[in-house]
Amino acid sequence: MTLLLLLLSAHFIGDFYLQPNHWIADRHAHKARSVALYKHTAMHAVLAAIAFYFAGYDWSTLGAGTLVVAVSHGLIDYFKAGRTSTLAFVVDQLAHLLIIGIVCAVALNLTVGQLQGYFLSLRQPAWLIYLLGYLFILQPASILIAQVLAGHTARLQNTDSQSLGSAGRWIGYVERLLALSFVLVEQYTGLGFLVATKTVFRVGDLSKSKDMRLTEYMMLGTLISFAIALITGWSINWAHAVLN
């Protein structure tokens, strides 16, 4: 675990704190001919070596692990060069984290049977309940809210909108994820802060709109969204208590 934490720390430091913006621009522009790409790879080699050293590994493991982490990082960044979408960023980071996970598994001499045991432990109902809850509050909950508000939505379609399109859906995703997480860890103060924060911004927008229908529509959608997260969280906690 120590090695994993150190390598993850090294990765985030190298990718997000010690990589200037002009290195990123140079890599996107020149790809394999980018000097910045090789500087960035060398930086990760140094950071990975430091991680292995402080984790207490011998020089042979340090050298091999550092080489794998650095070379794989350079190759992944090379293939990502020129791609600046959110999807490309997520895939890039997942690839880096996968390599770090594999390196740690090899360094710790984890067998296939041990790894299989770790993954099989995720089949326990206690874990699956959490997975089911988070899956439900995203797309199924969005569809449910849309269905409940369908009649009101039709009446508001002809009004001028300054919305960012799908931004409202993503705001709903994030607020329900946070609300459910606060309920599961029984931090209702955080939930209250979340509700208050959204209310402040919503009141400002709605006071400018001068439209009672829009005010009621927004309030209804918000209340349904939080209600779904709360009921889901309480249901998960109840099911977890029953299973234990």
Image (cartoon, rainbow, N blue to C red):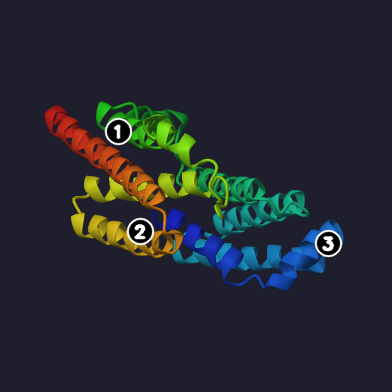
What x and y, as percent, mark residue 17? 57, 71
Amino acid type assigned to the residue bearing label 1 in the image? Trp
Q: Position of residue 35 (x, y in %)?
A: 81, 68
**Residue 156, position as x, y percentages in the image:** 48, 42
Q: Amino acid at mark 3?
A: Ala
Q: Is residue 72 above or below residue 209?
A: above
- Name the side, left or right, on which 19 lies relative to 22: left
Kindly indicate whether the residue at mark 1 contacts the one at mark 3 (C-beta within 8 angstroms).
no
Q: Secondary structure at mark 2?
A: helix
Q: Badge 2, how many Cα within 10 Å: few under 14, some, many 20+?
A: few
C-alpha span from label 2 to label 3: 40 Å
Q: Does residue 207 show up?
A: yes
According to the picture, the residue beneath numbered tag 3 turns out to be 29
What's the distance in space between the residues labelled 3 and 1, CA to CA?
Answer: 44 Å
Q: x, y percentage for residue 120?
A: 37, 27
The residue drawn where x is 18% and y is 33% is: 240
Write down the residue under mark 2: 198
Report how far apart the C-alphas of labels 1 and 2 lie in the structure.
Answer: 30 Å
Left or right, 137 with reference to 52 = left
